[in-house]
Image: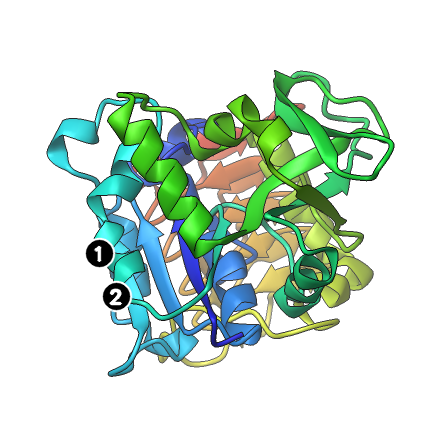
Amino acid sequence: MAKVIGVINLGNEREQLQELTNHRSMASVPFAGRYRLIDFTLSNMINAGVHNVAVFTRKKYRSLLDHLGSGKEWDLDRQQGGLFILPPPDYAMDLEGDIQHFKQNMAFFNRSRADYVLVSNGNLVWNIDFTHVFNFHEEMEADITVIFKEFNDEKVDTEKFDTLEENEQGWISSINRDVSPKPGDRVYLDTFFIKKELLLDMIQKCDEQGDNLTLVDAVKDKIDRFKIAGYHFKGYFPFIQSLESFYRHSMALLDPNVSQELFFNRGLIYTKVKHEPPAKYMELSDVQNSLIANGCVIEGTVENSILFRGVKVHKDAVVKNSIVMQKSEIGEGAYLENVILDKDVKVSPGKEIAGDNVPTVIAKSTVL
């Protein structure tokens, strides 16, 4: 897909994961032991041959800059094209829409010879072949092709999504913003293909009219003028919009079938490489049904848990049904259950922490 450029648009992210997004964007939230949420969409683009990608950041992007670096892990450290991380203009920091951000970076689009733009979000956990979507877009001769997933998560009853409706001809006829979906509803996955000229024309007209809409609202307002096709993604897609759903879908990865579907059925998912030794299991350690990343040292008990890189679990410590992020340390005899520890948390010897239906979250670099 050499004639496609990619945009990962973080301009309208919502800070929905409490302490986990206090100091980072949603896109840079750690996931699955060694990844960040942005790794999935970025890897999907690379696997489809999109080698010119811009990340439109907005707020709290320091950790994102550190994670992405030059983009070499995604083969984006290159002379032609590559990875571009584009912060918003200062005057747009407090604006709700994202049109001004696109307007500010028109040069990124103008200097590319690509005919199409793939716009997506940075917090989607999925493994999709974008070449299939692009082929569908061209076959339909659509102006815009949006990607949707049929809603099937009955445990989500308070979260809001955008949903789509089709007319009798099979084109998208309406976009319903921030609604509570019912099973079977078409949930818009914040991802679409569009002709570059059409995108630039939309941005220019919105700017001239003084509208600071989101791109979705700009499309919605003129939906009768476009041929908008809907591509149904049928693969694994967890809807993560709350701390509860983040925890539940993280723990689902302990099921080998789920991990296989997400990481190995299509292209690979890439992430920042850290040269650490394999996990080390000491003589008295007891580990069951857990995901343990490299660099960990386990002396105690770990059950039904996810441990990120460099975690230390000392002698007689117990970790159950928990997520422990990078370089955290669990002291001797400590007990954790239904807990999410952010990076660099130190749990003192003998300390007990237990959550209930919603896990207890311990903020980054906390000492307990």
- Nearest the camera: 199 or 286? 199
Q: Is residue 4 left or right of residue 164?
A: left
Where is residue 333 drawn, in percent x and y?
A: 49, 46
**At 54% from the left edge and 59% from the top edge, which residue is drawn?**
40
Residue 247 in the figure: left or right of residue 41: right
What kind of element bears circle 1? helix
Camera-side residue of 357 and 54: 54
Q: Residue at x 63, y 51 (%)?
A: 305
* Label 2 secondary element: loop
Type of amino acid at the residue the image marks with label 2: Arg
Q: Residue at x 32, y 67 (%)?
A: 112
Residue 347 visible from this viewpoint:
no
Residue type indicated by callout 1: Ala
Query: In the drawing, does residue 272 fall left or right of residue 301?
Result: left
Residue holding disc 2: 111
**Vertical order, 110 against 199 (above or below):** below
Residue plotted at (72% across, 44% down): 230
Q: Quadrant of residue 321?
A: top right
Q: Is residue 244 above or below residue 284?
A: above
As displayed, is residue 48 above or below residue 195?
below
Whether the residues at callouts 1 and 2 have beta carbons within 8 Å, the answer is yes
Q: Quadrant of the N terminus?
A: bottom right
The location of residue 130, given as percent across then percent down, is: 62, 64
Q: Quadrant of residue 202?
A: top left
Depicted 346 relative to depicted 182: above or below? below
Q: Nearer the viewer, residue 135 or 169?
A: 169
Give the Cα distance between marks 1 and 2.
6 Å
Q: Quadrant of the C terminus?
A: top left
Q: Badge 1, how many Cα within 10 Å: few under 14, some, many 20+?
A: few
Q: Any mark on residue 278, and which? A: none
Task: Classify 10 Å Cα crowding around label 2: few (below 14), some (14-19), many (20 and above).
Answer: few
User: Which residue is label 1 attached to?
Assistant: 107
